Image (cartoon, coloured by chain):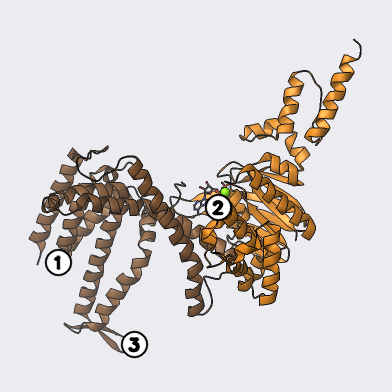
Chain colours: A orange, B brown
Amino acid sequence: MDITFDHVSYTYQPNTPFEHRALDDLSFTIQSGSFVAVIGHTGSGKSTLIQHLNGLLQPTEGQVQVGPYTMKAGEKNKQLMKLRENVGVVFQYPEHQLFEETVEKDIGFGPQNFGVGQDEIKRRTKEAVQAVKLPEELLERSPFDLSGGQMRRVAISGVLAMDPEVLVLDEPTAGLDPNGRKEIMDMFYHLHQEKGLTTVLVTHSMEDALAYADHIIIMNQGKVYREGTPLEIFKQQQALEDVQLDVPEVVSFLKMARDYGLDLEYEGQTIAELAKEIALKVKGGGDHE
Amino acid sequence: MSSSLIIGQYIPSDSVIHRLDPRSKIAVIFFYVVIVFFANSVMSYGVLALFALSSAVLSKVPFSYIMKGLKPVWFLVIFTFLLHLFVTREGEVAFSLFGWAVYEEGLIQGAAISLRFFLLILVTSLLTLTTTPIEITDAIEELLGPLKKVKFPVHELALMMSISLRFIPTLMQETEKISKAQASRGVDFRTGAFKDRVKAVVPLLVPLFVSAFKRAEELAMAMEARGYQGGEGRTKLRELKLERRDWLLFAVFILLAAVLFLTRS
Ligand SMILES: Nc1ncnc2c1ncn2[C@@H]1O[C@H](COP(=O)(O)OP(=O)(O)O)[C@@H](O)[C@H]1O
Ligand SMILES: [Mg+2]
């Protein structure tokens, strides 16, 4: 599903002393089937932005279009349920939303609300726990007896079982150990490709953005600060530093290499490709000995 | 934590009203509530209203915001007024409405009672708008201090109060977060039959309780780890002290009470 923001603004608690304009005139388009990373400082409005994707928040100005669904400032959308069935959102620390007696029931909770049949729920539950690598024995256990990492996987399965076309992830790996992080991100990427999802990932990790995204939106103070492919974005190291954002390791390494006189441009190389390139240059330089 | 959430609706500012000792504010409001019930003439209501309104102005809280905060009680005020209007059957008939006679006495009583009600709510909400929850608990602990002599657990009570107040915004945030998460999984909190709506509360309440208990446990552990053992011999970081402005407030208030009792009819 194509997603379009058209001059969207959102103000929290309007007309009070606490009034806060969290989104300020956002316009951008996310192509159906793309993997988009939304990056920005804490408080830059990322979470506010993604809550517009399934109608949890309604723009105070402008219009959001998600596939066939429109949310326009001041107009009630009558198809919120349909929209929410199609847009799965994994919130920050999603394990806080678990409540059922068993893991199986909790995973089936979403699909059940959307009127999916029992057999289909069973099938999807099985598929979802396999996707997140959760042992099937756990299905009968209480979600509150599990470890933190397992609870996170259960919560993610609960969203996957809704079988959404758009998957929205708000820092889905926050608080996990590095191994768990990579596993979960790889899993999302695999699903993204296998099911042809449109994925929107909010992240602090430039490495993740570089590794998985094909489009990056940088947010700053409620506005789109930069937008483009990872290559376009990470070439602008200075612009990123201006808003206190890092660049991926590869890019900052290249900068250091330039300081040592190695003239290399960032063109989306991986670490391995870069190593080869450098080896070539260094050897080439050593030839005339 | 985001300061943008309404924290017991306290609005930071440095107005005179904000800087008053919380004990003075609580004491004066307490007595104000008492004397409101003695007012019975236009003049006595006038001075009471003057006092409340000038405090509101001095507090520098935007008037529109105060009024918005009073929104839920407007209904009650109007309801009380109408009740008196239609039920009181004393004095002359003032006019009739849809064939129902409205008596003069009803008009007067209706107006008086709703004004009383309005003033009470205005001054008490001024307290919470200009005083942080922590100040309020400190003040209550001090004011109830004498009860310690009869083994009343004043300190524990104040601690319970301040902890609850501290966690209200957290709990509100959590509630919002979890209800959004569940709404994303297809829970509909807004429409549907009553039975369905009650059922929709379970996915909200269970996670809230779980996290509240977890928080309580962590807090208890952190307090013990830092050697907390109750009120005995505990000193305070902020000592409350009466200033000139507090004495001024008392003077104004005594003047108000005197005028009120002199102008009673
Ligand atoms: N429920 C809320 N009420 C008031 N202000 C909020 C609320 N949620 C977020 N904000 C404010 O909006 C801004 C953007 O927040 P958010 O979208 O959560 O940013 P991010 O996810 O990028 O950290 C912040 O300044 C935050 O304090
Ligand atoms: Mg966020």
The amino acid type, in three-letter code, at marker 3 is Phe
Q: Residue at x 68, y 56 (%)?
A: A133
Q: CA distance from mark 1 to mark 2?
A: 66 Å
Report x, y in % for residue A207: 70, 39
Picture quadrant where residue A193 is located: bottom right
Q: Residue at x 23, y 76 (%)?
A: B107
- Chain of the residue under label 3: B
Q: Marks 1 and 3: in contact by CB < 8 Å?
A: no
Query: Looking at the image, is mark 3 or mark 1 earlier in the sequence?
Result: 1
Which residue does the numbered mark 2 point to in the structure image?
A148
Of residue B252 and residue B208, the one placed in the foreground of this image is B208
**Residue B6 in view in this figure:** no
Residue B82's place in the image compared with A96, above or below, is below
Residue B98 got which mark? 3
Which SS class for mark 2? Answer: helix
Q: Judge if badges 3 and 2 mark residues of a common chain.
A: no
Report x, y in % for residue B198: 47, 74
